[in-house]
Amino acid sequence: MVLYEEYLTYLKGVKNLTDSTLIAYGEDLKELLTYLEEKNIPLNEFTIHDARLYIKTLNDKYSKKSVSRKISALRTYFTYLVKREVVKHNIFQDISVKDRGFHLPSFLSEDEVKRL
């Protein structure tokens, strides 16, 4: 967990992320680390296959937008781990995020605005 704490400190100091983003990233990382512990997978042995299985569990629990954010957090974390030479390759770079399902906002017509 030392790398986890160092990483969050790095994000706060170097990347200057907001507290809410840090909390969300921290929860995302804890969730992955808990999954790895439950599956007895050392972080440095985590494979693309393992990552895809993990993402499947995320897709079963969360919205597309939340899964996308979690993958983004993990991609950034694994970039950090590569720089620290904990892992050799950022496996999350090889995982594309599917359509986030963003929709254009609805708006009022001129008549509706006039009625306000």
Image (cartoon, rainbow, N blue to C red):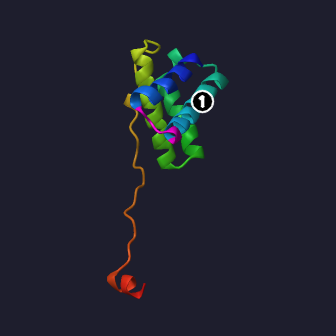
- Considering depth in this image, is 12 or 82 the residue closer to the camera? 12
Which residue occupies the extreme top position in the image?
85
Provide the secondary structure element on which disc 1 rests. helix
Is 12 within the magenta?
no
Q: Residue at x 35, y 86 (%)?
A: 111
Q: Is residue 107 above or below residue 80?
A: below
Range of magenta residues: 16-20
Indicate the amino acid at tag 1: Lys
- Considering depth in this image, is 88 or 6 the residue closer to the camera? 6
Q: Position of residue 41 (x, y in %)?
A: 59, 19
Q: Residue at x 38, y 37 (%)?
A: 96
Q: Is residue 76 above or below residue 104?
A: above
Magenta part mainly helix, strand or loop?
loop
Q: Residue at x 43, y 30 (%)?
A: 75
Q: Position of residue 3 (x, y in %)?
A: 53, 18
Q: Position of residue 77 (x, y in %)?
A: 46, 26
Within 10 angstroms of label 1, few (less than 14), some, or many (20 or more) residues? Answer: some
Answer with left or right where residue 81 lies relative to residue 57.
left
Quadrant in the picture for residue 106? bottom left
Answer with left or right where residue 91 lies relative to residue 53.
left
User: Which residue carries the number 1 mark?
Assistant: 30
